[in-house]
Image (spheres, rainbow, N blue to C red):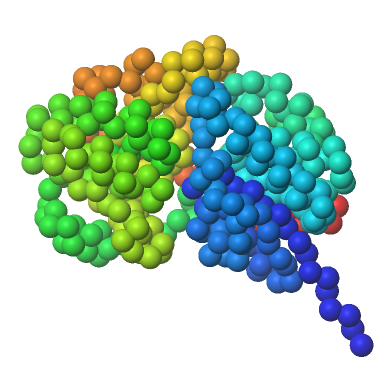
Amino acid sequence: MVARARVMRVFLIAGEPSGDKLGAALMRGLKELSPRIDFDGIGGPMMQAEGLESRFPMQELSVMGIAEILPKYRALKRRIAQTAQTVIEMQPDVLITIDSPDFSFRVAKAVKSASQVRTVHYVAPTVWAWRPRRAEKISHFVDHLLALFPFEPPYFTKHGMACDFVGHPVVAEPVPSAAEVSAFRQKYGLGDARLLLVLPGSREGEVKRLSGVFGDAVAQFVAEDTSLRVIVPAAAPVADFVKQAVAGWQVDALVLDPRDMSHDAGAAQKRAAFKAADIALAASGTVSLELAAAQTPMVVAYKMNALSYFLIRRMALVDTVTLVNLVADARVVPEFLGPDCEATAIANALRDTLAAPASQNDAMNVTMERLGRGMEDPGLRAARAVLSGMNE
């Protein structure tokens, strides 16, 4: 009688919506390649849909910025200790931490100091942008890195870590058809109007900091062309904050609340909105890649706590934070960060970008090609890399 294959146990940690999305795709890939598998850990609705029962709400970890972390430090410290002890006692085959380095690396370090559990971190830290010494430091407790950008592996392999470029998940997203875009416009009575997409972030702190200046910039921009319609796709965790903020704007805006529909329907509506838009104003982050996939020209802006901005700018090694600019090695997406995040400057950039989007279109195509468009699904590539590393 042939014995059944042993069940592989995987503990995953994600701390924000983008990590939840990566984790869900990775879980699907692992299930396809290794059907006998059990998941445990911390994640959001997308990972839970793939079979994870989160040990506590993922939103507890969605904190960004040095000054923003300080008020929640004690609670995070308790969660770090609790999570690390759970992994040490469980002894899974692999611990996979996904982004959220302030939490993930502390857990991995504690686990590694007390066990031989293999540690994989998904989304290589941006040592090419700031704090380059992190690469050597994390080599002591991270066995394997999964990188989203093709230029990243050499920064880590020289310190003895395995590091695989697995492609960026944005290239695997479905592209809305003309019929889907038309249906979206018809559903909300948008007709043939030009659309301005406004994306003030997926965290409560981001929305609170950005909604005021974004609203003022939009009001100035729309005043020059009152035929423009304003669409604000809200991330589910902050939908109420977005609605409250937008209600105080000087212009009418349609807020898309994904909580009113299934996850798949909400995601499809968001993609249709991105594709339908003529231009976007977005918070800095991975959303710029989603806009690039939709071929939507953009202006990027971000405001953070003054202390966080001061410290990060002092340590920065790059002259842009916008991923399209970085991946395409171009500087075509205007960005307004920290004290430069000012309404009039943003409104002027929106006007100029809408008038001449060609350079951004070229850079967006280059970006998608370099991130793996046309190659194997990134989630499956990530799963294959995890399993290959474990076998080695």
Farthest-out residue, right: 1
331, 35: nearer the viewer = 35
Q: Image quarter for residue 99? A: top right
Residue sitting at 51 percent across and 40 percent down? 62
Where is the N terminus found, in terms of image quarters?
A: bottom right
Please provide percent x and percent y for residue 56: 59, 52
Residue 62 appears anywhere in the view: yes
Above or below, 157 against 379 in this view is above
Residue sitting at 8 percent across and 41 percent down? 227
Relative to 186, is 341 on the left or the right?
right
Residue sitting at 60 percent across and 30 percent down? 73
187, 164: nearer the viewer = 187
Farthest-out residue, bottom: 1
Residue sitting at 38 percent across and 65 percent down? 262
Q: How many callouts does the rendering have?
A: 0
Please provide percent x and percent y for residue 34: 72, 68
